[in-house]
Image (spheres, rainbow, N blue to C red):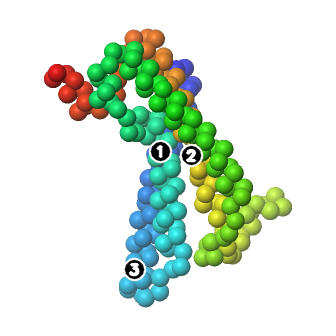
Amino acid sequence: MSATVMFVDRMVRKALTAFCAVLLLLMVVFTVYSVVMRYVFENPPVWGDLLTVLSNIWLVFFALALTVRDKDHIALDLVYTWLPLKAAFAVQQFWSLVIFGLGIVMIVYGMEAVSTMGGKYWEMWYFAWEDGRFVFKPNYMPKKYAISIVPISGFLVSLAALASIIEDCMRLNTGTYELGKDTDIQDTADQA
């Protein structure tokens, strides 16, 4: 890959990793705050559990894009070791294309879900963009904000699968392509 594309890929990975770390930290903070408020002060916030769940959902969807890009998702790595290199390459690229298609499905149906999602979270406030500025809305965050992670994640998953395919093709052409990164599988293959 060109230096610019590799730089952008590295920055996207770092940004997603940092965002996942922040979401994980927020989950812990919201949970601890809710527990302390519930059992020590006997006055739990109504929004504590919801924000913990939403942070968890967004974390999982962002992490999905990272696992696709790093090829850490569920795969048949052991089967790949039994196949000739080019056949294993073809099977891996087929699954990357399937994952790319899944990302497209997430985009299409996620956008539909966001546009048709009704209802609001009564316990949440939010900010909205109105008349060229952010306006504080004191209550009732629309549920479509929470589900907007689906098309965002679909875009990131598709992008990660595409980057993975391109990178693998370039490595195959230069002769530096290797099968999975799982050392246990490589050790098993080396021992056989």
Of 125 and 179, the residue lying toward us = 179
If you read the primary sequence from the N terminus, does the residue marked by circle 3 or circle 1 appear first?
A: 3
Q: Amino acid at mark 2?
A: Ser
Q: Is residue 17 above or below residue 54?
A: above
Residue at image coords 52%, 70%: 50
- Label placed on residue 123: none
2 or 1: tag closer to the N-terminus = 1
x, y percent for residue 167: 48, 23
Q: Amino acid at mark 3?
A: Val
SS class of the residue under badge 3?
A: helix
Tag shown at residue 153: 2
Residue 155 visible in the displayed image:
no
Work out whether residue 179 can be spotted. yes
Residue drawn at (68%, 55%) of the image: 114
Which residue is labeled 1 in the image?
64
Total numbered labels placed on residues in the image? 3
Residue identifier under label 3: 36
C-alpha separation, residue under disc 2 versus residue under disc 1: 8 Å
- Secondary structure under tag 1 reads helix
Between circles 3 and 1, the one closer to the viewer is 1
Q: Which residue shows up at 51% across the image and 50% down it?
A: 61
Residue type at numbered disc 1: Leu
Residue closer to the observer: 159 or 80: 80
